[in-house]
Each structure stands twice: as structure tokens, then as C-alpha cells.
Image (cartoon, grey):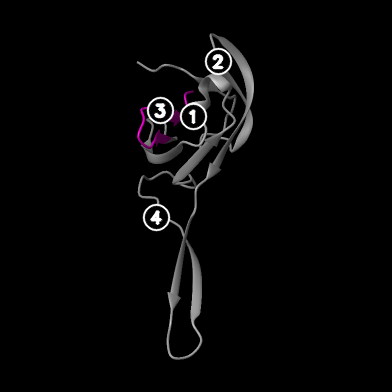
Amino acid sequence: MCNYIAGIESKFTGHPPTRGDWTMMCAGNYQVQFVSLNEVTTTLTLTTTTTKAPTTVTTTVTSINSTGVSNAPMSLTLSGACVYKRALNGLTYDLVGKTADGSPFYKAKGVEEYIYYDA
């Protein structure tokens, strides 16, 4: 059984809204919180040194989405939770699959917290 923490009105099911006013349960009351879900990107830096001047190449690595969910970020970081739910701030949520209607399904690293679309 899910313990509902927060929600936002959205008809788009391709990925969670990147920012907006979420209704969040905080200290026993629902309140509006401006929440951001920022895509996590990985940067790989490779430095090669030869007898000539060293060369540095920086490349942004994008993971291949193997979940079958198109255009959904592989990882998201949450910010903007209320003081009561501040432990959610900074959590990274990884794309782990899709729901029955094809919407992306995310799980936080190291804790049992999830982000998903519920029609």
C-alpha cells in the first residue's frame, strides 16, 4: 500500500513535471510546495598526457534508456520539499521501469520512495 506524500495535476504522462506547485502532506496538513525535479547528468573527463602538451577532453555521457520509456530522464534529483519532509530534498530517483499505462516509474537510491504517474 502506498503512503501518498505529494501530487501535482498533470495530464502529460511522458515524465514527471520538472517544476511546479505540488500539494504535499506536511505535519498532518496539505500545503503547496514549489518542487523541482532536475535531471541528473554525468560528465566524464579524460586527460591524456604525451610528450607534447596535455590534452583534456570532457564529454557528457547520456545513459541508454533500456526501460522502454521514451524521453524520460534516467535520473532525477528532488528539491523543494517542506521542512517536515526535508529528507526528500537531494534524493536521486532512478528510472526503474514503467507503469501499466507506460508512464515512467522512479525509485530513490537507498530508500523506499517513488515517483510515478497515477491516473
Q: Earlier in the sequence, mark 4 or mark 3?
A: 4
Q: In the figure, 102 relative to 31: above or below? A: below
Which stretch did the figure color magenta?
105-119
C-alpha distance separating marks 1 and 4: 26 Å
Q: Residue at x 52, y 32 (%)?
A: 89
Q: Earlier in the sequence, mark 4 or mark 2?
A: 2
Q: Residue at x 62, y 35 (%)?
A: 19
Residue 41 visible to the viewer: yes
User: Residue at label 1?
Assistant: 88
C-alpha distance separating marks 4 and 3: 23 Å
C-alpha distance separating marks 1 and 3: 8 Å
C-alpha distance separating marks 1 and 2: 12 Å
Numbered tag placed on residue 26 in the rendering: 2
Please indicate whether residue 91 sits to the left or right of residue 32 in the image. left
Q: Tell me which amino acid carries mark 1.
A: Leu
User: Residue at label 3?
Assistant: 113
